Image: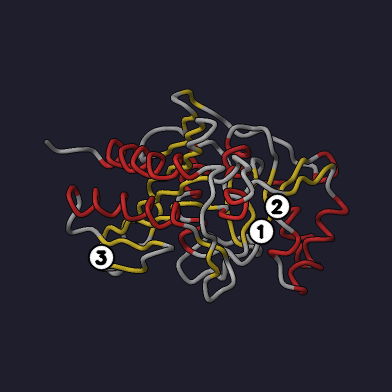
Amino acid sequence: MSLSDLALAELLAEAAGQAIRPWFRRPFLVETKEDFSPVTIADREAEAAIRRLLDQYRPDDGVIGEEYGDDRPDAERVWVLDPIDGTRAFVAGRPLFGTLIGLMEQGQPVLGIIDQCIIGDRWLAAPGQPTLLNGARVHVRHCASLAQARIGTTSPQAFDAADFRCFERVRVGAGDTLYGGDCHNYGLVAAGHLDAVVESGLKLHDWAALVPIITGAGGVITDWQGAPLTTASRGAVIAAGDPALAAAIAQMLAG
């Protein structure tokens, strides 16, 4: 039986959730990777489960994953995986992490899923259809004014010193700033609850799935200069529901 890419992506999300849920708020070993980020058995089991299905259903596609590296990353079609985006939140028992599953074709993100397997939030976006949250269409909120905007970022510690000084200019000008949330924040932008997210230091597996979800809900997601994200981007990201707000944030970041 042949599965569509979207049906397969949902199957991958289900498999990841089945691997993650037994470990949530349970004792486990937390290891520290070379980049000083944490990793758990849940991260590894979730990505392994996804890769087994990709080997079965899409053996010719490439895979880029946070935990097990790259496999045919130069293929025309590449699945980009972050089994637990927000491992620190997962370790702390906070249900605001998520599984990110993206599909890139010829270097462009075309399909994305954010799956929060504990509270049951699943955003998905695919070519030719709007972004859905738990099966219902969602749309961004239009808010052009930074002074009225509700913005989010995962942590002040995630910025280097220079980027944090830039972010502080945005924070001071924003109506409200919320911390924590990881990939869940981007889903909240797509659903119109947050107006923008500003972050830096993201890797491809952190943002590839987010691009279709934000744009499919009518929003914009760019680098800090307002340019589209590419595999060469340094991982400084603005996601916003309103293009005017994204431009205002980019201007503030530039000083």
Give the x, y percent position of residue 31.
Answer: 53, 66
The label on residue 153 is: 2
In the image, residue 130 sits, relative to residue 72, either above or below, namely above
State the CA–CA distance, disc 2 to disc 3. Answer: 32 Å
Residue position marked by numbered label 3 in the rendering: 75
- The residue at the far top in this view is 136
State the CA–CA distance, disc 3 to disc 1. Answer: 28 Å
> Looking at this view, is 149 or 101 the one in front?
101
**Which one is in front in this view, the residue at disc 2 or the one at disc 3?**
2
Which picture quadrant has residue 61?
bottom left
Confirm or deny contact between disc 2 and disc 1 (CB under 8 A): yes
Residue shown at the point (11%, 36%) measured from the top left: 1
> Looking at this view, is 123 or 109 the one in front?
123
- The residue at the far front in this view is 27
Mark 1 element type: strand
Q: Residues within 10 Å of mark 1 (few under 14, many from 20)?
A: many
State the CA–CA distance, disc 2 to disc 1. Answer: 6 Å
Residue position marked by numbered label 1 in the rendering: 199
